[in-house]
Amino acid sequence: MFGNLVSIVAGIAFILLTMNDVFQSVIVPRATGRRYRLSVYVWRAIWRLWPGMAWRLDPENGGRREEFLAAFAPFTLTLLIFLWASLLIVGFGLVLWGLRGGITPARPTFGAVLYYAGTSLVTIGYGDIVSHGWAARLASVLAGLAGLSLLSITTAYLFAIFGSFQTRETFVVVIGARAGAPPSGVNLLTIAGYSRTRDDLPPLMIGAQRWAAALMESHLAYPVLAFFRSSHDEQSWIGTLGTLLDAATLMMTTIDDPRDGQARLFYNVGRHATYDLSNYLMISATAGEQTVGIERSEFDDACNQLVEAGYKLRDRDEAWKRFSDLRSNYAARLNALARFFEIPPLQWIGDRSAIGASAHD
């Protein structure tokens, strides 16, 4: 009797932990706590190994490495759905094992009870094993309801994931067309100068504000989205966010143009997104919280490019001081995100050409 009670309690614990993870991962449209979340532990544990395997697979040519890194998110998403279903089967199997006195045929093995829980969960019901006690019948009905719920919830979850991914990547492609490949904030501004589309920069920053806000909300609600890589070479959501932040910071501090209001608004949204995402994903800025991330010579080179593109600049010493102050508010966290997700290196963002090679030998 005591063994049956322990089995029932253990099964209920499995079911509650699994449904809690499904509820917080799929249904709650906001960032939730990480305690007792199976999905959080799974994707973090696998990602600790995945980049290292990618570098060993292709240490020189990045093509195969990028393909392997891109496979992580679909693999993990599929694995999570499989684990949720498996744990529910085990949970209901333990409950039914504790109630096996109400199951026919009599004295079933644990394997047979687990099979019965599985057929109940997926609502197949072959009829070779049936329940006749009220408690066992209730457990089998609840297993069927849990299976149907999991199927419908994960279907909606997948649609939400891919919808958010497509929205994110559409804007990534737009910025790639405006900022070159690989994109950078300096390129975004110089291309606008050469193509005489500088008047498009304020509307672009309005679109960037909406994109960054949607990025923050969707990636905090569905963290696995952050691991979906762009299908286009040398592009990523982190690179796009950094490109826009650098461009906005240059517009605010270096370019002598009063039309920087929308850039200021985007800077606030983009910096907020960088902070919240790195914090929720538990990605520490090992380089320190206050660092500009580039040398003065790099800033001067950028200024020269902007002048050649037709921009009028403010005093460089004063501009460098203001640029350093503002960029130090997001540079460390942005580079930490770039290193963590192993994005292709960009100008001023996540350049790991020397660090990465040694770290993954």
Image (cartoon, rainbow, N blue to C red):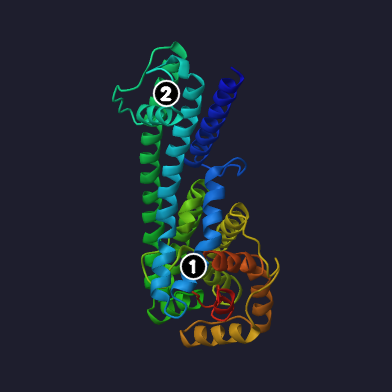
Q: Please tell me how crowded label 1 is: few (under 14), some (14-19), or many (20+) other residues with Cα within 10 Å.
A: some
**In what element is the residue under mark 2?**
loop
Residue 161, position in %: x, y?
A: 40, 48
* Amino acid type at mark 1: Met
Quadrant of image for the N terminus = top right
Above or below: residue 226 compared with residue 345: above
Q: Could one spot residue 275 in this view of the protein?
A: yes
Q: As rendered, which of 63 and 286 lies closer to the eye?
A: 63
Q: Quadrant of residue 117?
A: top left
Q: Nearer the viewer, residue 59 or 11?
A: 11
Q: State the residue position of label 1.
A: 53
Q: Secondary structure at mark 1?
A: helix
| Circle on res. 108 | 2
Q: Is residue 125 above or below residue 40?
A: above
Q: Residue at x 46, y 42 (%)?
A: 83
Q: Nearer the viewer, residue 259 or 349?
A: 349
